[in-house]
Structures are given as structure tokens and as C-alpha cells.
Amino acid sequence: MKDHIWNPWHGCIKWSQGCKNCYVYRRDASVGRDASHVARTKSFAYPLAKTRGGAYKIPSGASVFCCMTSDFFLEEADPWREEAWDIIRIRSDVQFSIITKRIIRFSQCIPADWGVGWPNVRIYCTTENQQAAEERLPIFLSLPIQEKGIICEPLLSPIYMEPWLGPDILQVVAGGESGPGARPCNYDWILDIRRQCAAAGTSFWFKQTGAKLIKDGRLYQIQRRFQHSQAKRAGIDFHPLRGGHPI
């Protein structure tokens, strides 16, 4: 079953080092659009859209990645978020994944009935460098979320995250930066995060190399179409068993 993307609003305000070369800004600029202008989209209610036959266009059991051209916890989106939560509540049969740099805003942005977390919502906290990890991960671990993941993308430095790994973290994803002006990612940083995950029994996914990868002291320029496939060829993903099944 394919993954779906739901962008209830578009546009974002740069937040940290990882935002410097944001692909949304780059793409919007190419068509004369200001990516810092945040607006509700025409596809706001996409998870509730139905076919002519009355079935949901996003089928039961599907995975939906939310706000891929913004941040779900963006302050400018506060007026629309409650309605977005209503949609997620209605589609409790669908798994929603939310990726955020603004984990510090999480507690003030959740619905009144959130409780210990909704089982159909997975939250990923991004940590592009050591500073971001130290600022965000202690907060992240303290929050009532049933499924948590960490995304180190674009990875801009080595990250020591062992104190925050363990059974509460479902998966760590790592990858370099893409696009013009991409900052280099060192393969040793990737391997060290993988080592930490393996020691903690946490799933690890090397998602993509980025445009500039340093390996064994050599800088490789990798074309966009090869960045995911080269990461896969590295063969370093780690998937421990939970309940007798790989994550």
C-alpha cells in the first residue's frame, strides 16, 4: 500500500540550522512564490475525500505523512490545527506521521482528548546536529506520544544520542542534505548513529546520502537520482525484532 502526503497548509518560517537550504523555499522560489507565506491549502480535508463510490480515497490502513511543505506545529498555523486534529481523529483507521523541528510547541498544540497519545499518530522529532539533539530530545522523551521517531536529516554534524535511545524510540532516520549549496555529510557520522541505534536496539534507516558525502576522507558529489539508491546499497539499515517481527 502506497504512502500518502497530506499538506493541510503550505509555507514555513525557518527555525534552525537545518532550515538553511530548505527545499520548500528553493522550490517555491523557482516559481516566484514566497515560502515564508503560510496559507491553508485546497487539500486541507484530503483525508476525508471520497471516491464516487463513497469510499475514502486514502484507504483504511494507509500511512499518511503530514505537512511535508510546512511544520504541523508552526505558530502561524494555530488557527487551523484544531480542525486538522478533528480530521485525524475521524480517520483513526489511518496512520499519520508528523515530522517537526518545533517539538517545544507540542504540549500547547495537542487536542484536549490527546491523553497518553493517539495510537494512529507517530511523531518524528528532527535533530540535525548535536545542539538540536540536546535541546529537543529531552523534551521529546518527556511527552505523551505512543510512537516516537528521530530524524537526523539533513545531518550536519556527529550526534551523540545514546542517552535518549531505547524502547521509547521506534526508529532513527539519517541522511545528508540535497540541492544547490548542500552542506557535506560525513559517512562516519552516519555509521556512528547506526552504532548507537544497534547498541540500544533501535531501528535505523540510512535514508539518503545527500548531494555531498564524505567517505574515507574523499568528497563524493552524488546526483539527486542516486542519493536514495546509494544509501540503500550501503546495506547498513538496522531492524531489530519486536514481538517477533522486524520494525
Image: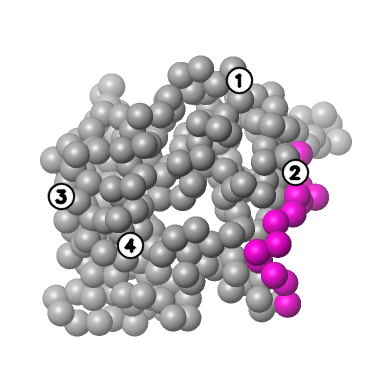
Comes first in the chain, label 3 or label 2: 2
Q: Is residue 40 magenta?
A: yes
Q: Amino acid at mark 1?
A: Ala
Q: Position of residue 21 (x, y in %)?
A: 48, 71
Residue on which disc 3 sits: 195
Give the alpha-carbon distance from disc 2 to disc 1, as whole Å: 21 Å
Magenta range is 32-45
Amino acid identity at mark 2? Phe
User: In the image shown, does 208 or 89 lie closer to the viewer?
Assistant: 89
Q: Which one is in front, 221 or 8?
A: 8
- The amino acid beneath tag 3 is Arg
Q: Is residue 170 visible?
A: no
Q: State the separation of the CA atoms marked 3 and 4.
A: 16 Å
Q: Relative to 170, is 47 on the left or the right? A: right
In this figure, which residue is indicated by the disc labeled 1?
112
Give the vertical position of 8 relative to 90 (above or below): below
Asked which quadrant contains residue 94, the reply is top right
Question: Pointer 2: what residue?
Answer: 44
- Mark 2 secondary-structure assignment: loop
Instruction: Give the position of the N terminus as an image quadrant.
Output: top right
The single residue placed furthest to the right in the displayed view is: 52
Dot 3 or dot 1, earlier in sequence? 1
Question: Which residue, given by chain and number where applicable, does mark 4 sit on?
Answer: 155
**Whether residue 89 is visible:** yes
Residue at coordinates 22% horizontally, 46% vertically from top-left? 161
Q: Earlier in the sequence, mark 2 or mark 4?
A: 2
Image coordinates for residue 227, horizontal then vertical, percent = 39, 69
The tag earlier along the polypeptide, 3 or 4, is 4
The answer for how far apart the CA atoms under marks 3 and 1 are is 39 Å
- Looking at the rendered structure, the secondary structure element under dot 4 is loop
Using a 10 Å C-alpha cutoff, classify the residue at mark 2 as few (fewer than 14 neighbours), some (14 to 19) or many (20 or more): some
